[in-house]
Amino acid sequence: MIDDTLDNKGRVRSGIILWRTMKAVGAQRIFIVYLVFLLVCCGVFCLAEPETFFGYGDAVWYCFQTITTIGFGDIVPRTMLVRALSVVVGLSALLVVALLTGVTVSFFNEKMRLRRNESFIEFDHGMEHLTELSSDQLARLEEQYRAFKGR
């Protein structure tokens, strides 16, 4: 039960770190704007080529194929407008994926920094109370010291 509580706290803290990281770089706004852009593009696709995109779902499916570069070929745009917008959708997807990658890397870097800080705080606390520690606690403190020294 204690492990579950600690695990849940870790997940909550991870979620907070990820949200703060996204907020710090403005990623959540970019994702929302990109989603709205995709939805608008789907509407434009339906209006520009009703003979190709029979419904909004077809346009969403086509955007998915374009973004993931799957390109099954079951829907092929014919007008220059839809082709140009398809290029923009595909290129902008590359930028959003790059942003997502950067946010993820920042998230894990921040998480590792917090873990190092927690380890240092625990080590510092142990050093302040050396005379009160058991032999097992002293052995753990020695391991932590060797790990710090090895960095």
Image: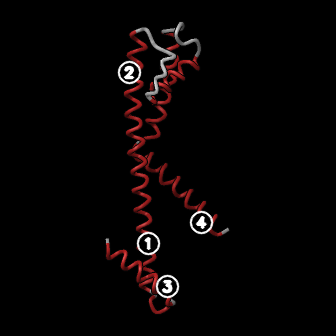
- SS at mark 3? helix
Residue ID for mark 1: 119
Q: Nearer the viewer, mark 2 or mark 4?
A: 2
Query: Few, some or many C-alpha atoms within 10 Å of disc 3 (few <14, some 14-19, many ≥20)?
Result: few
The earlier-in-sequence mark between 4 and 1 is 4
> For this rendering, which residue is in front, 26 or 10?
10
Alpha carbon of mark 1 to alpha carbon of mark 2: how far?
A: 48 Å
Mark 2–mark 3 contact, CB under 8 Å?
no
Q: Amino acid at mark 4?
A: Leu
- Callout 4 secondary element: helix
Disc 3 designates what residue?
Answer: 137
Q: Reply above or below: 93 against 49.
A: below
**Mark earlier in primary sequence (4, 3):** 4
Residue, x 54% and y 23% (percent of image)?
61
Q: Secondary structure at mark 1?
A: helix
Q: CA distance from mark 1 to mark 3?
A: 14 Å
Q: Which structural element holds mark 2?
A: helix
State left or right for residue 59 relative to residue 143. Answer: right
Whole-number angstrom distance, CA of label 4 to CA of label 3: 21 Å
Upstream in the sequence, badge 2 or badge 3?
2
Q: Which residue is mark 2?
A: 87
Q: Quadrant of the C terminus?
A: bottom left
Residue drawn at (41%, 73%), measured in percent from left and top? 120
